[in-house]
Image (cartoon, rainbow, N blue to C red):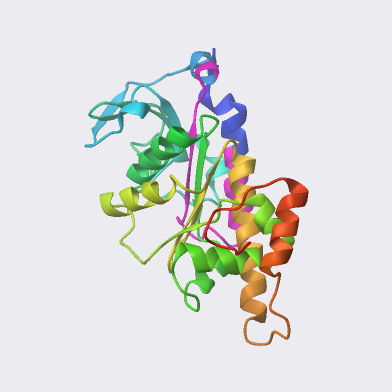
Amino acid sequence: MIKYTELTAVKELANLTYTMWQMGWDEKNGGNISYLLSPEETKVIYCDQTPRFIKLENIPNNLVGHYLIITASGSNFRLVKNSIETTVGVIRIEQEGYTIVAGFENNNKPTSEIYMHILSHSSRLEVDPTHRVVVHNHATEISEMTFVHELDDKTLTRSLWGMITECIIVFPDGVGVLPWMVCGNEEIGKATAKKLTNCRIVIWAHHGILATGSSLNDAFGLIETVNKAAKIYMNTFDKRITTGITDKQLIEVCDFFDVTPRKGIING
């Protein structure tokens, strides 16, 4: 048995929080991450504190009994890797809420976005049994793009696909887009989870982005790719002399790499 801080996933998470802070994507206490433990990981960790139960309504059945590593409310990503015991903890999902079983020292608790994380994990597990991770941050250029672009799944996905060849390969399922909403409440959690039934990435207008995946590296890579495309879009949209990658060219890329793009976005 080992302490949760010795898990590879926790070490990767701590390093990722610092990386995202260095990129300017997690100012102050912006952003949060959660990681669904596998049965094997759950078996090897031990809990060295008195459990704390937190009531939370409308827990999805497919998450009950699962364990989640999640960042703390108010945690500064610049500091996480040097204060894991207070800024990262482990919770067990219960029918009526969740129990803190490790970490969150000094009476800390999970991120205020916890309900979004729980619903997002539930939604992705329904369509992808390899799913494990939800990463949310305030990637700069994708947030900028929501001020100058239509806020709907189809048109924003198409614009991103048109910026870099790799986009349609990396996220052929496209992106989901939500209008501005109050963060941390049940409404945005449900809306995000609904979008995640069709894709792995959701953009919150004038706020940030979240991505899901089978690993921390997988989810972070999706955000990197989306934000790179958004940066190119923002740097060129008022000065272009070409229209970007055409529908025909995108189809050629999909054929070569054997990927199936989300329907209704490109013609052909």
Horizontal arrangement in the rendering, residue 253 relative to residue 191 (left or right): right
In this rendering, does residue 22 appear at all?
no
- Figure check: 214 above or below 246: above
Foreground pick, 242 / 82:
242
Foreground pick, 58 / 1:
58
| Res 104 quadrant in image | top left
Horizontal arrangement in the rendering, residue 87 relative to residue 98 (left or right): right
Q: Position of residue 149 (x, y in %)?
A: 50, 75
- Figure check: 75 above or below 41: below
Asked if residue 37 lies in the magenta stretch, the reply is: yes
Asked if residue 47 lies in the magenta stretch, the reply is: no
Rendered residue at 58%/26% (across/down): 7
- The N terminus - image quarter: top right
Horizontal arrangement in the rendering, residue 227 relative to residue 205 (left or right): right
Q: Position of residue 189 (x, y in %)?
A: 33, 49
- Figure check: 4 above or below 115: above
Rendered residue at 30%/33% (across/down): 60
Question: Magenta part of the protein: which range?
Answer: 13-40
Q: Position of residue 166 (x, y in %)?
A: 72, 57
Rendered residue at 66%/78% (across/down): 235
Q: Position of residue 196 (x, y in %)?
A: 44, 47
- The C terminus - image quarter: bottom right
Horizontal arrangement in the rendering, residue 68 relative to residue 264 (left or right): left
Rendered residue at 39%/35% (across/down): 122
Q: Residue furthest right?
A: 256
